[in-house]
Image (cartoon, coloured by chain):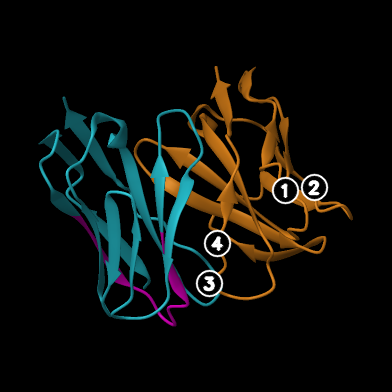
């Protein structure tokens, strides 16, 4: 059965304190893995797509990496405006499966 | 380029009523997917439409249905509303022609069932 687990469920960091969010997945026929950011009451905002193990993508303070079983979202020197829920979504052959997300809170 | 739009943004209904939500995809996108988001279950896939045909379906009861028009706009209908249907309903669009395509989400419709 296709599954995706994100950890931790919630994370509080001080401004400038770097950390990583984890996405573990079991998906048949992975076609891609997406990362989204979601602010309260809004739709998810696209961040990255990763297609193959070893691939990395960066955007400002965020870097996403992919292995055969996991993806990591590294956040370097975060700012309060990086506070949001981060969603991981691997795509199987015919569907996209969303994790429940990591709620990230950056304290000033 | 305009993003995905959803109407209405907020809706209050009572149990037993039905509701129709609308989604206009990004211009050129032919695939529209619908999701239900609740605090306990996260984002759950309802169905996907491509070129006016339902291409994939999640595990939701038949009270949830949808359709897509020739201009790629999509509607979702929920009949005989239950309290548990209260959620944020999100629509996402993509080109739909191959796997691994990015889906772009609208702002959602917040449905409250009383």
Which colour represents chain B?
A: orange
What chain letter is assigned to the residue under label 2? B
Q: Secondary structure at mark 1?
A: loop
Have a look at marks 2 and 3 and say if they share a chain. yes
Residue at left offset 51%, top offset 29%: B86
Q: Can residue A26 be found in the magenta stretch? A: yes
**Of the residues under marks 1 and 3, which one precedes in the sequence?**
1
Have a look at marks 2 and 4 and say if they share a chain. yes
Residue pointed to by mark 1: B25
Q: Quadrant of the C terminus of chain B?
A: top right
Do the CB atoms of the residues marked 2 and 3 lie less than 8 Å apart? no
Have a look at marks 3 and 4 and say if they share a chain. yes
Tag on residue B73?
2
**Of the residues under marks 1 and 2, which one precedes in the sequence?**
1
**Rendered location of residue B63, percent (x, y):** 66, 44
Mark 2–mark 3 distance (CA, rounded to whole Å): 22 Å
Residue pointed to by mark 4: B102
Q: Secondary structure at mark 4?
A: loop
Do the CB atoms of the residues marked 4 and 1 lie less than 8 Å apart? no
Segment colored magenta: A21-34
Q: Secondary structure at mark 3?
A: loop
Have a look at marks 1 and 3 and say if they share a chain. yes
């Amino acid at each position: 059965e296709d599954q995706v687990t994100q950890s931790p469920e919630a994370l509080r960091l001080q401004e400038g304190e770097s950390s990583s969010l984890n996405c573990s997945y079991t998906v048949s026929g992975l076609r891609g893995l997406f990362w989204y950011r979601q602010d309260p009451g809004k739709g998810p905002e696209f961040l990255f797509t990763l297609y193959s193990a070893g691939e990395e993508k960066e955007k400002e303070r965020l870097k996403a990496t992919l292995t055969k079983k996991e993806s990591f979202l590294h956040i370097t020197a975060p700012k309060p405006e990086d506070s949001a829920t981060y969603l991981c979504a691997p795509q199987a052959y015919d569907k996209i499966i969303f994790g429940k997300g990591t709620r990230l809170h950056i304290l000033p | 380029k305009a993003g995905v739009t959803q109407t209405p943004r907020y809706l209050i209904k009572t149990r037993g009523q039905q509701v129709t939500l609308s989604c206009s995809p990004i211009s050129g996108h032919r695939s529209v997917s619908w999701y239900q988001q609740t605090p306990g279950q996260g984002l759950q896939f309802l169905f996907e439409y491509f070129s006016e045909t339902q291409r994939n379906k999640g595990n939701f009861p038949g009270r949830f249905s949808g359709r897509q028009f020739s201009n790629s706009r999509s509607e979702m209908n929920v009949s005989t509303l239950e309290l548990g249907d209260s959620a944020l309903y999100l629509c996402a669009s993509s080109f739909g022609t191959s796997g691994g395509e990015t889906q772009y989400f609208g702002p959602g419709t917040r449905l409250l069932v009383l």
